[in-house]
Image (spheres, coloured by chain):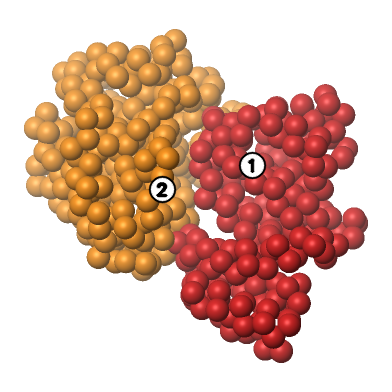
Amino acid sequence: MDFSPIKKAIVSFEEEKIKKLIEEFIEKGIRPQEILEHGLIPGMKEVGRLFEIKEYYVPEVLLAAETFYAGFNMIKPLLIENKSGRKGRIVIGVVQGDIHDIGKNIVKVMLEASGYDVIDLGKDVPNERFIEVVDQEKPDILALSSLMTTTMVHMEIIIKLLNKKRLRKTVKVIVGGAPITQEYADKIGADGYAEDAAGATRLVDRLLQGNE
Amino acid sequence: MNNSVFQSQRINDVIGRRKKFAVFPLVCADHCARIFNKEFKDVANDFVMLAETLKYGYSLYKYDMVLVFSDPYVEAEAMGCSLEYAPYPRLKHSVKYSPDKLIKISQSCVNPEIMNRITTSPNHDRREVIINAARLLKESLDVPVFVSIKGPFTLACFITGIEDFLKLLLHDESQAKSVIERTLNFQRDYLKKLLQIPVHIFIGDPLASSSVISPLLFEKYAFEPLRILVREIKENGMNAGIHICGYTKPIIDILDRLNADILSIEDITLKTKTLKMGGVSTSTLLHGDREQIRNEIESALKEDFLILSTSCDVSVNTPSENIKTMIDIARSYEV
């Protein structure tokens, strides 16, 4: 089966086309897992590659992400019936006081496109909310984003709260955002730092390798 | 020549390449309000308090210029966006958003009702706060006073919603350009009032950086409005600075073509004809120690001419000691 038209539709932001293609694939009896693995994920991976080599920028990634979701949302209900195929569970959000979420949204789509279940808490998320969700959902990874030097301090507070609630050992914490550095991640006791969305996906793959 | 007169000339001497460097960490009203024990919301809404707060910062650090910068949303608010203070201002929603309904982007920009809300909104207009504070500072300080205004591209992002506007750039060129035309005209009107004082101008256009849009889109949407503003500033005999943080390597030649007097960028090793401003990372100033600050200054001063500064606004919580350290170390390199 040739899945390249799906990949191509994502790379060229053709939302209507991808909907039509997914419909055709489902009608032909192709399993949703295969559509995801051979069409949608490679499409978004190619977008990630183009972003990394600076051929695509944020507007292009946003449009590609819209196209990806147009297709992904059609097969998602079918995928939920068979969760075993997913690679891990991630909770993601922008920390308290910070409303800059473009970077977080791009990381989210890249992680979903790489086969992870992502619970998106949105932006300006109170510290306690992260703790609550980690406790309830038992994710493999907690991904924290911040774009401001005034709000990045919440990352450290969240890690301390996880320790206090004895949840720290249950989840790996990764951090990212413009003012964040590897040095800062080490200083606050995070498990990892990534500079961009492609790096975040590789980081999660690496951190969860032992779990697979 | 006494020290204050000497200090007042440093920026101009560096721009004129008669002096190697001057110093101005990008200290803005939020940091000054914290060290002056003032509520930021009060400072941002009262021109006397804003001027006093910035003057306090200047008296403490003694840098070579003063920047009148309250927050990035002065013009966006005046164009109809809502802000909330938490405690620093942030965009609550952009012009096109109504509380219960998100209007689709392609409709929002062609909808005359939405476009009319821009500039005719009854929202609070703080441009007068900035203008009057700048006037007070100009009268009372003997160092150059710069006022920071938003680049038309970034302002267009703010008023329509950043993600939606970025998508519009690829969806519908004419609609995107019509929003930018609005923001450009708005900024020309603001600029005219500032140039009557007169003050020097910094145009901040961070969302036009190559961390966000491609050089192609920069050239198509951001370049010409910036060029027009720079030309008008210079025609009035004042200095024009451009601040674009983030990744700027792919657009550095285009930025040079703006013919500004100062380019405030993160990577000052990039080759430019325009005088550069930067050299010390905001993160180093926030978290670093004396040696780290010294190392970055030493490295920055390898440039022939420079306004030694931070790569972006000094974070509100930056320790005062670190800012003083930066100035002290820089002064020790002066001949």
- Tell me which chain the residue with mark 2 is part of: B
Q: Nearer the viewer, residue B190 or A24?
A: A24
Q: Nearer the viewer, residue B328 or A158?
A: A158
Q: Is residue B260 left or right of residue B335?
A: left
Q: Is residue B136 left or right of residue B96?
A: left
Q: In this rendering, do the residues under marks 1 and 2 share a single chain?
A: no
Q: Amino acid at mark 1?
A: Leu
Dot 2 crowding, Cα within 10 Å, few <14, some 14–19, many 20+: few
Q: Is residue A158 above or below residue B280?
A: above
Give the farthest residue toward the front.
A27
Q: Amino acid at mark 2?
A: Leu
Q: Residue at x 76, y 77 (%)?
A: A31
Residue A29, position as x, y percentages in the image: 73, 82
Looking at the image, is mark 1 or mark 2 nearer the viewer?
A: 2
Q: Nearer the viewer, residue A57 or A129?
A: A129
Q: Nearer the viewer, residue B143 or A128?
A: A128
Quadrant containing the C terminus of chain A is bottom right
Tell me, yes or no, if residue A166 can be seen here: yes
Residue B25, position as x, y percentages in the image: 41, 32
- Give the drawing colour for chain A: red
- Give the drawing colour for chain B: orange
Q: Is residue A22 above or below residue A158?
A: below
Residue matched to label 1 = A121
Q: Residue at x 85, y 33 (%)?
A: A167
Residue matched to label 2 = B102
Residue A163, position as x, y percentages in the image: 83, 28
